[in-house]
Image: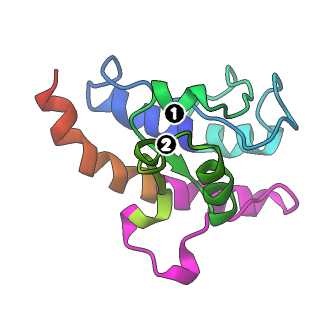
Amino acid sequence: MAEVVFRHLAEQAGLGENIIVSSRGTGDWHVGERADSRTLAALTARGYGGSEHRAHEMDTVDFRTNDLIIALDRTHLRVLSSLAPSPEDLSKIELLQTFVGSSDDALDVPDPYYADDLAFAQVLATIEKSCAALFNQLEPAIRRKR
């Protein structure tokens, strides 16, 4: 969801060509598969795409090719931190919810996988808010580098 939402924000701001947005899983459970049908339904209901998404697993190479790596929860943060090849790479990792100033007890974006359709819509709303906050922080620097 976050990949689709952030890419949409960049495109709406005319910066889609200036930002590479991708998503990675911390395990190989769904590599090559499409997004969950409930994810796609939630995205579609809010006017997003996402049908072209295929799952990929995070690799240490991803640290070399990305300036910023966003974790959606603290479990992902720990896994990503253990994969970081260097202290510099470790400094690239941030929790998405920190961009909206969430308190420690609200830093994790919930995983709706074992929940109902409403949970997917609620998680999408959380992601939209956090991605907007992140984009608002990054946009001035991206525009300067154009």
Q: Which residue occupies 27% across, 32% down?
A: 13
Residue tagged by mark 1? 63
Image quarter (top left, top right, bottom left or bottom right) of the N terminus: top right
Furthest residue to the left?
144
Q: Indicate which disc residue 86 carries.
A: 2
* Kind of residue indicated by mark 1: Phe
From the viewer's perspective, tell me whether residue 119 is left or right of residue 144.
right
Q: Which residues are magenta?
A: 99-128
Image quarter (top left, top right, bottom left or bottom right) of the C terminus: top left
Asked if residue 31 is among those painted magenta in the image, a careful observer would answer no
Q: Residues within 10 Å of mark 1 (few under 14, many from 20)?
A: many
Query: Horizontal and vertical percent for residue 21?
Result: 48, 29
> Mark 2 or mark 1, which is nearer the start of the sequence?
1
Quick one: 101 or 127, which is closer to the camera?
101
Q: Is residue 13 visible?
A: yes
Q: Which residue occupies 83% across, 55% down?
A: 113
Q: Which residue occupies 38% across, 37% down?
A: 9
From the viewer's perspective, tell me whether residue 146 is left or right of residue 102.
left
* Cβ–Cβ under 8 Å for marks 1 and 2: yes
Mark 2 lies on a secondary structure that is loop
Q: Indicate which disc residue 141 carries.
A: none
Tell me the distance, in whole angstroms, between the alpha carbons under discs 1 and 2: 9 Å
Query: Horizontal and vertical percent for residue 122?
Result: 64, 63
From the viewer's perspective, tell me whether residue 61 is left or right of residue 99.
right
